[in-house]
Image: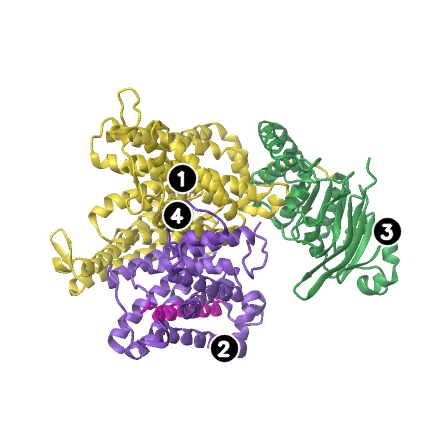
Chain colours: A yellow, B green, C purple
Amino acid sequence: MMRKRRAQAGSGSDHRPKEHARTPSLRAGRIGASLPWVVVAGLLAAPLTFVHSSGLFAYLAQACAMIVFALSYNLLLGETGLLSFGHAAYAGLGAFAAAHLFNRGGIALPWLPLAGGAAGAAFGMLFGAVATRRAGTAFAMITLGIGELVAAAVWTLPEGFGGAAGVSIDRGSGPSWGAWTFGAPREAYVVIACWTVVSMLAMFALGRTPLARMAHAVRENAPRVEALGIDPRCIRLAMFTLGAFFAGVAGTLTLVDVELASSESVAMTRSGAVLIATVIGGSSTFFGPVLGALVLTGMSVALAGVTRAWPAYLGLLFVAVVLRAPAGIVGWWGAPRTRVERDGIRVAARTHGLGALAAAAWLAALVILVETLYARRFAADAGGAWYLGAFAFDIGVPSTWSILGVLIVVGAVATRCARRARRRACARANGGVQR
Amino acid sequence: MTAHAALRLEGVARRFGATQILSGVDLSIATGERHALIGPNGAGKSTLFNVIGGALRPDAGTIWLDGIDVTGRRPHVLARAGLGRSFQTTRVFARSTVLENLSCAVWCGLVAARRGYERGLAERMASWTRWWWRSREIDALAARMLGELELEDVAHTAAGALEYGAQRRLDLGIALASGACTLLLDEPTAGMNRGEAARTIEWLRGVSSGKTLLVIEHDMDAVFALADRVSVMVRGRIIATGTPAQIRADAHVREVYLGAGQGGEAS
Amino acid sequence: MQAFAVATLNGVSYGLLLFMLSAGLTLIFSMLGVLNFAHASFYMLGAYLGYSIAAHAGFVVALVAAPVVVGVMGAALERTLLRHAKANGPLHELLLTFGLAYLLAELVKLVWGLGSVSFALPGVLDGPLIAWGDATFSRYRAFMMATSVATLAVLYLLLRTSRTGLVLRAALTHARAVEALGHDVARIGTLVFAVGTSLAALAGVIGAPLAVVEPGMAEAVGSIVFVVVIVGGMGSLGGAFAASLLIGCVQTWAVGSGASLGSLAHIAGVRLPPVWASLAVSQVAPLVPYALLVAMLACRPRGLFGRREDDA
């Protein structure tokens, strides 16, 4: 038997100080952990209590469905490491099944998402049995093929999908609960919000089960899991089915919102949207996809009203996140805190201040360039120029180019200064070894 | 009590394209025996492990584990039948802590449970839930393995951040923590310095009593300290089997592998 | 009979086009380890660029210039963006190429507008080549086949006989060893990416007059190319060839067929409800490649010529 060496105080292990300071940091940790829940609950409850804006209603109804959709997608991507390009198929098929069930009568609207979820799970198990036979890149392509199959089938097949018009429901025509008929948007929103909270809690709890831990293990090293006696394919299929269940729930929430299930519910653009939302938010934490869903819906609702170029901004944000912040917005947000802890607030403030200035300059230059290009193509009748207040930016006018030039120079200089400051702070943190 | 050999191979063959990597391997290892497999690079030892472990299917031949024919079965089925293995390239769950790695291995071992590997789905699901509630037991077992591996001071470090020797020990620990009865260990002391290698071998001797070991090794000191019997594999075939002393004295083996003169280091 | 022969020839020409796309994709995958989700976007770029260049300088110039421009663009993107994403793993690279595909679609919409553009057939290639009864095989289709075969033959010869080709073939399977011998593997990777994307662009230019050139064409063709790659076996050029021809022919037969699902089911001895039986085979033609994918995966997950990989 090997002699047991007692770890001595001088061994320099990093985790020791944390153990001694456990009590106050644990309490702070608990508050920090419950804060996002409070924020989300507050956000969802806002339209019902003190805020009376129909725009907010519409945004939140859409956002809720997207939140559940993105969380269900993260069961695949974040927990099991499965990148799927066709997740909307299960959301849409769940919506179609729910619409048919509702139109046949008998089921009250609040129970509908359960039916949609069950239908989604059934299709998930059916297609998942085929898709999970491979992993990694092959799995991604297979889900793409299955997504296209479902999208094409919904267009082509005569029965069940209503052709171009889709299948519509009338919320108020179902059985009512007391005084509520669910025809009014407010009542429908309550259903949507409640189901969103229930789904979030369910998926959070799922993340604590042994199945989720096995899924993490499969994500990290599937051959090792196999050598330990658990079949990775079973784990993947189980997570795929669960993801499809919650996707079906999300699809039904959209059905409740817009009262229509159509070919758009299964479209590849929807699969792409949930992928973008989850990656932007961050797939390694629970609330990453929630944030991503809120950002995506915000851009598609609010930003779309301001500029035509919002898909370009979304795409650029996505590429920027993939390149520079692979852990998503949530991951990128946590980085400044560690730097403040390490370098002290003054140095961190200087680095981040310079970084913010650089980012602002680059962003302004980007916005001007994109908007003027789009104005040249799409606003020809307005003179092909982009108007910011009374100021006109036009591609053909030299003043636009000189402003762009100034912004680019400012951005470049600020980036260089920020990088130098960061390098100096790093060197100081490492004991001044590099100079 | 069974008179079966713990692991028996008969005529196992495997080719990749035009190259015959394994040509008729016969091997029999008794229960509780520590068996070393030595041979020059390219002899096919790791391929043999992959075939036994289920990652590759043999083109011909049969493999028996505890008397059950397991030829061509997938790795997780073999693990449920009591086979464990460690890998030549370290395979740990890099983003989890060391303690979580070991807890995972213990849990998988308890859930997969070696006896009766053909259990039905309902039974398997029941054992999942049963062991979920007994996490204290699991943590205790994992902590004990942690102590034996001398990894207590890095218990909460991510496994991917460990230095090489510690990662190899963890790899071995995962294989052992799963409670397997028959272990395939692929070069357990690779990359370790002499002191570490000697300590690892001594630890293996202690912790593997009652278990069957099949070890690929290049370090002759380790082989002669650990093994009850040794097989020499050259170009996909086993050319000699015997006690370490017999192998050391075998002229053919010396000519092919150990080098003429003394029974020295591996080339 | 003649109609079937012409449909087969059309199917083969479509299959060869698909092979040009999937060959480039397979080369990039084998060399760089990343499945280029934006591959069909380069096809679309080639079609649009070909249209613009042909409008000013003629079809022949477009045939040469568009692939070169797109190849240079592909090389630049690989050097700047893809290398950055490499550190985070293959799934991240796939995500990056997905983002690139999205942005390229937006770029196309910005430069050429939202609607479709019509690429006029060059006069000398317009018209029938062979006429059998009432089935005609058009000259342009023959030109398509000839160009595809010629390009692929040139590529094959280059790979087999030139020194760069030798180094490239070695680097496809043993990149580290080739690097240790002193060759710049990263530069070879960029070259492969450029060759793959210019192949896609060439396919775009020659396919454009027959296809609908609009911003959604990348998505439509892209999915079929990925199906081809999976059905043929990832990383296998022979598999891609077989799968391209198979899918090209089957889909062309389905589109041109006058049969209905009911008559097909009748041959198989299965009775379908009347709503389904009256559905024409040409109507369900878009579903055929994906149905083939699911069938292939259910029976033989590694594809026609794929190796059984260890992605447990």
User: In the image, which is nearer the foreground, mark 4 or mark 1?
Assistant: 4
The residue tagged 2 is C158
Among the 4 quarters of the image, the one containing residue C195: bottom left
* Residue toward you, A282 or A30: A282
Residue under pointer 4: C276
Residue type at the position of mark 3: Thr
Chain of the residue on which disc 4 is drawn: C
Q: Give the magenta part as a residue range.
A: C186-210
Q: Is A351 one of the magenta-colored residues?
A: no
Query: SS for tag 2?
Result: helix
Tag 2 or tag 4, which sits nearer the N-term?
A: 2
Q: CA distance from mark 3 to mark 2?
A: 57 Å
Q: Residue at x 51, y 37 (%)?
A: A212
* Secondary element at image label 4: helix
Q: Do discs 4 and 1 belong to a common subunit? A: no
Instruction: Give the distance between the C-alpha atoms of the residues marked 4 and 1, in whole angstroms.
Output: 29 Å
Q: Provide the residue designation for mark 3.
A: B243
Label annotation for residue A247:
1
The picture places residue C241, in percent across and down from the top left corner, at 49, 66
Give the CA separation, mark 3 to mark 1. 62 Å
Q: In terms of secondary structure, where does tag 3 sit? A: loop
Looking at the image, residue B142 sits to the left or right of residue A215; the answer is right
Residue A297: percent from left, percent from top: 30, 42
Quadrant of image for the N terminus of chain A: top right
**Protein chain holding label 1:** A
| Vertical placement of residue A340 versus A105, above or below | below
Up the image or down, B241 lies above or below C248; here it is above
Of the pair B152 and C24, the residue shown nearer to us = C24
Amino acid type at mark 4: Trp
**Do marks 2 and 1 share a subunit?**
no
